[in-house]
Amino acid sequence: MTRRHQLRANISGFTLAEVLIAVAIFVIAIFAILKMVSQSMSLVRSIQLQRPDLGTLAGKTMMDPPQTGEGGDVVNGLASGLTTPDDEDFGGNNGGSIALYPDAKWERYLDPIDETNGLYRATITVFEENKDGSESEFTLNFLLFRPDLAEQEMGSAQ
């Protein structure tokens, strides 16, 4: 009888309690991963439905350095009047097929209020094609103070 008891002590394996605990941990881990995947998918869906941020475009308008061409004329950047700047985030602004907003483009219009001191009224308009084929238009107006731009435009006018 002692020999039979020694044989059972040498047999290795998992007890029922250990197996149940392992299965419970596995199930909890799977449900946690599924919840994270679900949250990530809903976040992606909400990002896809977002409209372009007009504040970011206003920031780009204020920070873009004016560029000069031959003869000192302002040819790109913040030239007064209507411009459609190149922007890799917008398909309509030479962003291509990998743009963040492939069905949108934006324009800005700079209207000098007082060219001598660099005060401009900036109007940013975003045009976006909706899923139903209609076009939406969003507009932002703000005042822009760029004395460096005024100096450059006054210098090119002479």
Image (tube, grey):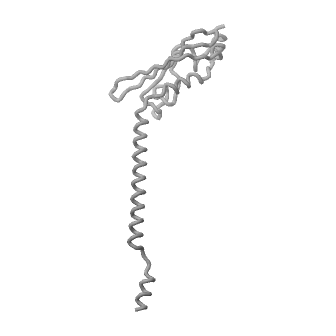
Image quadrant containing the C terminus: top right
Tell me where residue 37 appears, x and y as whole percent. 41, 48
Q: For the point 52% across and 27% down, which residue is it?
A: 87
Count of marks, rendered view: 0
Residue 45 pos. (x, y %)? 40, 38
Q: Position of residue 69 (x, y in %)?
A: 62, 18
Q: Quadrant of the N terminus?
A: bottom left
- Quadrant location of residue 66? top right
In the displayed structure, 22 sits above or below 98; it is: below
Using the image, determine if residue 6 lies above or below residue 118: below
Q: Using the image as rendered, state which of residue 156 and residue 117 is in the foreground.
A: 117
**In the picture shown, does residue 22 fall above or below 158?**
below
| Figure check: 88 above or below 41 | above
Toward the top, the furthest residue is 158
Residue appearing at x 66%, y 13% in the figure: 151
| Rendered location of residue 10, percent (x, y) | 45, 83
Q: Residue at x 56, y 25 (%)?
A: 60
Q: Is residue 96 left or right of residue 131?
A: right
- Residue at point 60%, 13% (across, down): 119
Residue found at the far left of this picture: 132
